[in-house]
Image: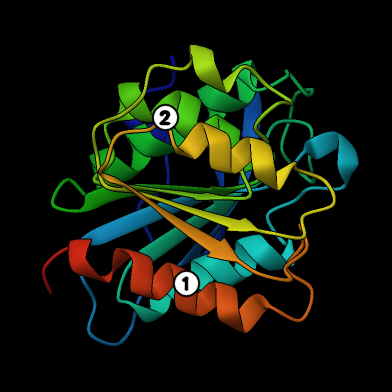
Amino acid sequence: MTESSSTFPAFPAASAALTLPGPSGALECLIDVAADEARAGTAIVCHPHPLHGGTMHNKVVTMVARSLQELGLNTVRFNFRGVGNSAGEYDDGIGESADLAALAAWVRRERPQDALWLAGFSFGSFVALRSARSLAPQQLIQIAPPVGRWAFQEIELPDCPWLVVQGEADEVVDPAAVFAWAATLPKTVQLVRMPDTSHFFHRRLMDLRGAVKNGVRDNLPPLR
């Protein structure tokens, strides 16, 4: 990013909508600030495919963010380039990774004491993974990673704690492909298989909430 730090808003003290400068222009964001038992951590949550209706308001993205906020983390949701009020055009994960990197840089500048977590649903989990090695988060969370739709095998893997949640009745992502890929990952990866669960977690959002909270609880940052 070429803008000086003075062009960036401060991290809000309470939950708020913000517009941040991004690589292709404005990035529309929603920040939710942890109120109870706040921890020294901020999680960025990435939404599903922009060309198939994915936005930061997606119910799975919202539930993941809510789950992490309940654990005491601040959360940042945002619209990738070309979605909502974010400027730019869809870029097959490449430009979207640059969007994520811009937000991560802002979070680290504004909250240097916080652990950075990355999370994503579907396409968003692909963007989070392909960015994780360079951004070095303290925790990675992937919900329904679209293995087989992008070249997951070519991504340089991070070495942080890592949670993968996959529904066994996913009609968009091939669960067998996800499970086979997960079997090749480092032992630090925790895989949660959810029976009778579709791609969008219909009627299983509360179960997803529990899977996320239980899956990351041992890696929570300290209380502020």
Left or right position of 218 against 63: left
Q: Is residue 33 visible?
A: no
Label 2 Cα neighbours within 10 Å, binned few <14 / some 14-19 / many ≥20: few
Q: Give residue 108's mark.
A: none
Q: Which residue is mark 1?
A: 211
Locate the C terminus by quadrant: bottom left
Picture layout, residue 158 above or below residue 106 = above
Which secondary structure lies at badge 2? loop
Residue 13 screen position, x and y as percent: 34, 70
- Judging depth in this view, the residue of 118 and 81 nearest the camera is 118
Q: Is residue 44 visible?
A: yes
- Judging depth in this view, the residue of 179 and 8 nearest the camera is 179
Q: Which residue is mark 2?
A: 184
Picture layout, residue 175 above or below residue 69 = above
Left or right position of 39 against 128: left
Residue 1 screen position, x and y as percent: 44, 18
Picture layout, residue 106 above or below residue 133 = below
Which secondary structure lies at badge 1? helix
Which of label 2 and label 1 is nearer to you? 2
Residue 67 screen position, x and y as percent: 46, 74
